Image (cartoon, rainbow, N blue to C red):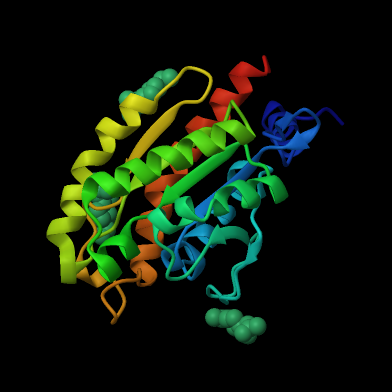
Amino acid sequence: MKLSWVSMIARLLSCCPNLHTYKVQGTKVRWMPLGDSITDYGCWRAWIWQRFQKDGYDIDLVGGEKAGENCSGLAFDRDHEGHPGFLAIDIVSKSQLVGWLKANPADIITVHLGTNDIYQRNIKTTDITTALGTLIDQMRTSNPATRIIVAQIIPLPAKDKQVQELNSAIPALAASKNSTVSPVWVVNQWTNFTTADLGSDRIHPSASGDIKIADKFYPALVRAISSIEKQEGR
Ligand SMILES: *[C@@H]1O[C@H](CO)[C@@H](O)[C@H](O)[C@H]1NC(C)=O
Ligand SMILES: *[C@@H]1O[C@H](CO)[C@@H](O)[C@H](O)[C@H]1NC(C)=O
Ligand SMILES: *[C@@H]1O[C@H](CO)[C@@H](O)[C@H](O)[C@H]1NC(C)=O
């Protein structure tokens, strides 16, 4: 019996569940989610992983931490580098990222940091952006072609004026660090994020906040993956 065009096309489309198994020097593309508790507890990583699966991206999440959250029972790669309570300036002064990247090198790194610098110690915007710049340098020492996605961070009602000041300084920092081999992209996680998207502590994302964070980071991750694909000539 002859196959109809429709069923042939359906077969072709279903043949290859992973359409984007990009590898860099033989290993899967590695994404490190770097941050504090907003990255650690946040189920946004689970939502992103689900979308990777759905869209056929075979991506390895990397980092020395393993998420313990249930996340509505969603399956996901639990590796990450989110450290509850950590300040960007401390990660730099203790050279912690250097060791984290030695243990778990990455091709793409998302950064959501600054909340604790502001919340715990009212660190000046310029000191936070200087720390973020040093972290970017350290990423490139580990992997000169790191794709970097820096978040303008989610609101922090207790000190949101400082958050907005940091967020407005991030694009200039990112532009000053940008390069063709190691692009830096900014993702604005602050806009459209309401108090309903924060949990009762008014610091961490609620379930709706997790989905908003995932929705913002996801296209940036896909863009980073395709820039690796282009560089590798696939
Ligand atoms: C995780 O949550 C789902 C539904 O929200 C539940 O069915 C499941 O038992 C939970 N798993 C664990 C290990 O707590
Ligand atoms: C950095 O360069 C890339 C192109 O390589 C561009 O897409 C991106 O917007 C630039 N980032 C910033 C912060 O200007
Ligand atoms: C803002 O959030 C709502 C959900 O609360 C979503 O439907 C909408 O697409 C978001 N808009 C933007 C511009 O992200």
| Residue ranking furthest to the front | 93
Location of the C terminus (image quadrant): top right
Question: 97 above or below 137?
Answer: below
Image quarter in which the N terminus is found: top right
Q: What x and y, as percent, mark residue 175? A: 32, 26
Name the quadrant where ligand 1 sits: bottom right
Residue appearing at x 34%, y 37% in the figure: 186
Residue 185 spot, x, y in % from top left: 39, 33
Residue at far right of view: 1
Q: In the picture provided, is 182 more to the left or to the right than 105? A: left
**In percent of the image, x 48 and y 46: which residue is there?**
110
Judged left or right of residue 135, residue 6 is right
Q: How many labels does the image show?
A: 0
Taking depth in this image into account, of 169 and 87 the one nearest to the observer is 87
User: Residue 107, percent across and down?
Assistant: 62, 36
In x, y percent, where is residue 74? 59, 68
Image-based side of 39 in relation to 69, left or right: left
Q: Is residue 176 above or below residue 15?
A: above
- Specify the quadrant of the image occupied by residue 231: top right
Asked if one can make out residue 54 in the rendered structure from this viewpoint, the answer is: yes
Closer to us: 202 or 125: 125
Closer-to-camera residue (176/74): 176
* Extreme residue toward the top, this view: 233
**Residue at 17% from the left image edge and 57% from the top image edge:** 162
User: Closer to the camera, 61 or 98?
Assistant: 98
Residue 197, can we see it? no
Please name the residue shown 17% across and 71% down the image: 158
Q: Is residue 204 left or right of residue 171?
A: right
